[in-house]
Image: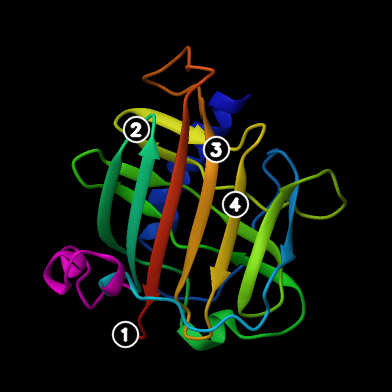
Amino acid sequence: MKRILALFLLASVALWGVACGGTDSGATDIGTTPIVATPANPTAGPLPSADEAADGPAEATVGCEDFFRFCVTSTISGAVDAAATAGMGGQVDDCVAWVAAGEPRILEMPMMQAAGEDRITHALTRVAAYTGPGSYELKAVATEGIPDMFPTIEAAGRTFSYGEGSTAVVTVAADGSGSIEATGLVEIASIQVSAPDPTARVDFNMQWTCRDN
């Protein structure tokens, strides 16, 4: 089942990434482990941009041309060490309106598609009950309603996602920038790895900026 889920999530990157217009829409439950997000800091301030997080402005903007809605930087450490920066589209018309406070709703994080030497692909991460800028801790619990989703990532031909002991925090700033901090993601079966290492773990950090274009 995890193998099927991983393949579906990674395939969804291409469909989501090419869209640059429209508004954020709800995703349906695709059978992942149900999780909900608990706002940890609803008044969090602006986060460092992807440019600030990288080694320098030149490196951070490679592949992040102005026509991309998001500039995304991903770093993986542990069983796989990899990093990449790339631009992505998104179903977002206005960055500030996209993350504005309001009634609970689904908020889908930016993705990454086959970026860098290790071809990092980051599939759907979502907060199912987003209420405004702040930090949301993802927790694997069975609840009613649409579940949140932990990040599923592929790098160097291996795939990692939620497992026992995994944690993840999504932080969103009022300007539409944000980050994902995930620890202890476990290796799951994939096209290239039919028998994943049960001891393999990675930590995942993603930062993004949102640009009105």
Which residue is disc 4 drawn over? 168
Task: Find out whether the residues at labels 4 and 1 contact each other: C-beta distance under 8 Å.
Answer: no
User: From the viewer's perspective, is 29 left or right of 154?
Assistant: right
The answer to if 66 sits in the magenta stretch is yes
Q: Secondary structure at mark 4?
A: strand
Tell me the magenta residue range. 52-68
Task: Find out whether the residues at labels 2 and 3 contact each other: C-beta distance under 8 Å.
Answer: no
Distance from label 1 to label 2 (Cα)?
A: 34 Å
Viewer can see residue 125:
yes
The answer to if 200 sits in the magenta stretch is no
Circle nearer the N terminus (3, 1): 3
- Mark 3 closeness class: few <14, some 14–19, many ≥20 residues within 10 Å: many
Circle nearer the N terminus (4, 2): 2
Which residue is disc 3 drawn over? 184
Q: Secondary structure at mark 3?
A: strand
Image quadrant where residue 88 sits? bottom left
- Residue 86: % across, % down: 26, 60
Which residue is disc 2 drawn over? 80
> Which residue is at a point 50% across and 59% down the rendered structure image?
180
Which residue is disc 1 drawn over? 213
Viewer can see residue 26:
no
Task: Find out whether the residues at labels 4 and 2 contact each other: C-beta distance under 8 Å.
Answer: no
Q: Nearer the viewer, residue 207 or 157?
A: 207
Nearest to the eye among marks 4 and 1: give it.
4
Task: Find out whether the residues at labels 3 and 4 contact each other: C-beta distance under 8 Å.
Answer: no
* Kind of residue indicated by mark 1: Asn
